[in-house]
Amino acid sequence: MDAKQNKTTNEHNKTTAETFKVIGNWKTLSKRLHAKFAQLTESDLKFETGKEEDLIKRIETRLHKKRDEVIQLLNAAQLVKPRVL
């Protein structure tokens, strides 16, 4: 594999492996995250469309976790189904 192909493959892997997109209601998701990680503030969890990277960086900093760990947390929180009482 030449350098150009390798770079393209690495960029693709980074994009697919480390992507976060809000699915559903962010307010519900942020409450779920705050319940699990009390140290996250309202400011940390502020979400603006198109500024996902800023959100990830704030959470990384507050939780002292790597980017991929934060994305896994966010994606996992979105997969949780609400309990019906």
Image (spheres, rainbow, N blue to C red):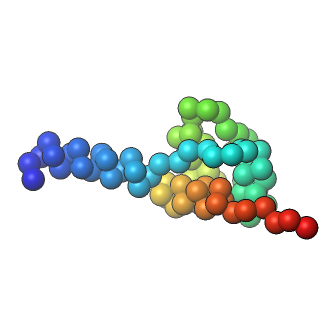
**Image spot of residue 3 (x, y percent):** 12, 46
Q: Is residue 45 visible?
A: no
Q: Is residue 17 visible?
A: yes
Q: Who's the residue at 65% across and 56% down the image?
A: 78
Q: Who's the residue at 56% across and 32% down the image?
A: 50
Question: Residue 55 occupies which quadrant of the picture?
Answer: top right
Q: Nearer the viewer, residue 85 or 16?
A: 85
**Image spot of residue 59 (x, y percent):** 61, 51
Instruction: Spot the residue most to the right.
Output: 85
Horizontal side of 69 relative to 7 (left or right) equals: right
Instruction: Spot the residue most to the front.
Output: 84
**Image spot of residue 40 (x, y percent):** 72, 53
With respect to residue 79, does 26 lie above or below? above
Q: Nearer the viewer, residue 48 or 54?
A: 48
Q: Nearer the viewer, residue 63 or 35?
A: 35
With respect to residue 42, does 77 lie above or below? below
